[in-house]
């Protein structure tokens, strides 16, 4: 599979190059040069196809110009030691739980695949790389865990001081070793901007082999398509493939873009819903046709507090204007109060804990189902993080403390190790010079 920049289509690269470059040199995002047809492979999948077998087959089909079938299998087996899970809440609604990985959030799928792929390429050519990543909370911990102790790789995680949950901060800052946490005095958008500037800065990008692990990296986007296909294969016989609707709680819109890829490559399914919090740039665009990125605002679903979603540029490649995008994506947004009420209401109705991001998605799923009472559609609402990652909020909403999974419990008592920096490229450069 070849990729081209969203800004200049002549700017092309293979998979290996794109995963290490992250951003194209013109500042654009990599996007598949042409869209493969995987419909035969997809239709061969059944409810019993194991996740890793499916993932290896898709990986090989996508990347067969660069890797062998057995390499695809090795990468997937190294990456996916955990699985998604489907929990049915009601006859028309299921939750696709994506939080059973090492950092208890869906980003584990993309980060683990990217880490396994990068380590494989780097070990082969015996070279080193530095990963630079900005996080509003969850990306960072998924990346930290995925790359921890990976050979030939160091990771710098930039996170906005005081804007991630205490548990998220523990997850980002307690590993040590090849994982370096930088606490930035600024917002998530500032962190993301710093990372983008470093990549396009001539001196920095020449002196260090900098690479990204954000949702902008195609090495994370491609594997995020796998769990849609897996859930679709498991449920299609029961409900009919075109009756499966997916709802994606969205911030940078990477997760949603991955679903769009799966659909483009031949996964025949029903409507696709994007759900956001008050950071509703995309819902506003679909309504008004005007795209106006703005500073992010703080909400209980803070991993979706994004004022300028980076993957919007990719979505525009497939859907050049609001009318086209509206055909493919229905967007909903909900305020903080609705989100907290939904956490409470879902618990009361189903005795089921959800994180605030998952709650925003469930609100959208339920709004759609209510508006289509006679439709045969079954909604699959993505659960993006374990509820215990947002204990304070879940407790505030339900009055009950959700149980902590073991992979989160063990970071609680470890000491924080983070370097504070100002929101300037100079400070970032100073850190790089001092350590590498
Ligand atoms: C990152 C994240 C999201 C948003 O995903 P995008 O791909 O950025 O749209 C939603 N929920 C959680 C828990 C996240 O960590």
Image (cartoon, grey):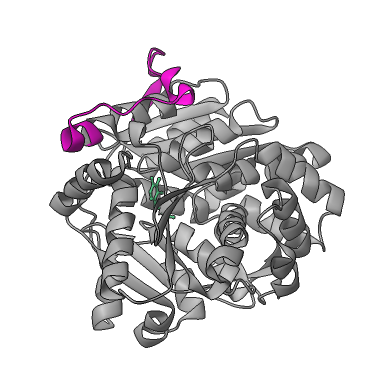
Residue 61 in view (yes/no):
yes
Which is more toward the observer, 409 or 119? 409
Q: Quadrant of residue 414?
A: top left
Residue 1 in view (yes/no):
no
- Expressed as whole percent of the image width and height from the top left, the position of residue 103 reads 48, 33
Q: Quadrant of the N terminus?
A: bottom right
- What residue is rendered at 58% in x and 35% in y? 146
- What residue is rendered at 52% in x and 67% in y? 239
Q: Quadrant of residue 80?
A: top right
The magenta stretch spans residue 298: no
Q: Quadrant of residue 313?
A: bottom left
> How many numbered badges does the structure rendering display?
0
Q: Which residues are magenta?
A: 394-421
Horizontal side, residue 74 vs residue 344: left or right:
right
- Expressed as whole percent of the image width and height from the top left, the position of residue 122 reads 75, 40
Q: Is residue 254 above or below residue 424?
A: below
Which is more toward the observer, 378 or 389? 378
């Amino acid at each position: 599979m070849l990729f081209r920049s969203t800004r200049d289509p002549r700017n092309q690269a293979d998979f290996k190059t794109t995963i290490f470059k992250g951003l194209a040199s013109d500042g654009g995002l990599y996007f598949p040069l042409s869209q493969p047809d995987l419909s035969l492979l997809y239709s061969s999948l059944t409810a019993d196809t194991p996740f890793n077998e499916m993932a290896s087959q898709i990986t090989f089909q996508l990347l067969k110009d660069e890797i062998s079938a057995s390499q695809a299998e090795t990468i997937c087996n190294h990456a996916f030691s955990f699985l998604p899970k489907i929990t049915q809440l009601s006859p028309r609604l299921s939750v696709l739980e994506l939080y059973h990985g090492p950092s208890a959030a869906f980003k584990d799928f993309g980060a683990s695949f990217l880490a396994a792929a990068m380590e494989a390429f780097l070990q082969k050519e015996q070279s080193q790389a530095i990963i630079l990543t900005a996080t509003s909370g969850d990306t960072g911990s998924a990346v930290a865990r995925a790359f921890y102790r990976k050979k030939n790789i160091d990771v710098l995680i930039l996170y906005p001081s005081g804007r991630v949950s205490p548990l998220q901060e523990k997850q980002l800052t307690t590993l040590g070793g090849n994982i370096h946490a930088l606490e930035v005095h600024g917002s998530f958008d500032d962190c993301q901007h710093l990372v983008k500037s470093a990549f396009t800065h001539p001196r920095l990008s020449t002196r260090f082999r900098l690479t990204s692990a954000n949702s902008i990296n195609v090495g994370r986007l491609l594997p995020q398509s796998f769990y849609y296909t897996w859930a679709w294969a498991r449920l299609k016989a029961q409900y009919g493939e075109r009756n499966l609707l997916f709802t994606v709680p969205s911030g940078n819109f990477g997760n949603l873009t991955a679903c769009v890829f799966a659909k483009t490559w031949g996964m025949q399914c029903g409507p696709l819903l994007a759900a956001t919090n008050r950071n509703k740039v995309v819902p506003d665009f679909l309504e008004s046709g005007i795209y106006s990125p703005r500073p992010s605002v703080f909400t209980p679903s803070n991993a979706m507090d994004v004022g300028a979603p980076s993957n919007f540029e990719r979505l525009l490649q497939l859907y050049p204007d609001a009318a086209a995008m509206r055909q493919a994506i229905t967007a909903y947004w909900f305020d903080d109060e609705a989100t907290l009420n939904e956490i409470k209401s879902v618990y009361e109705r189903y005795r089921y804990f959800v994180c605030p991001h998952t709650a925003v998605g469930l609100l959208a799923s339920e709004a759609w189902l209510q508006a289509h009472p006679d439709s045969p559609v079954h909604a699959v609402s993505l659960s993006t993080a374990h509820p215990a990652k947002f204990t304070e909020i879940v407790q505030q909403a339900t009055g009950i403390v959700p149980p902590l999974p073991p992979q989160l419990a063990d970071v609680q008592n470890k000491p924080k190790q983070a370097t504070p920096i100002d929101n300037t490229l100079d400070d970032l450069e100073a850190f790089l010079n001092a350590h590498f």
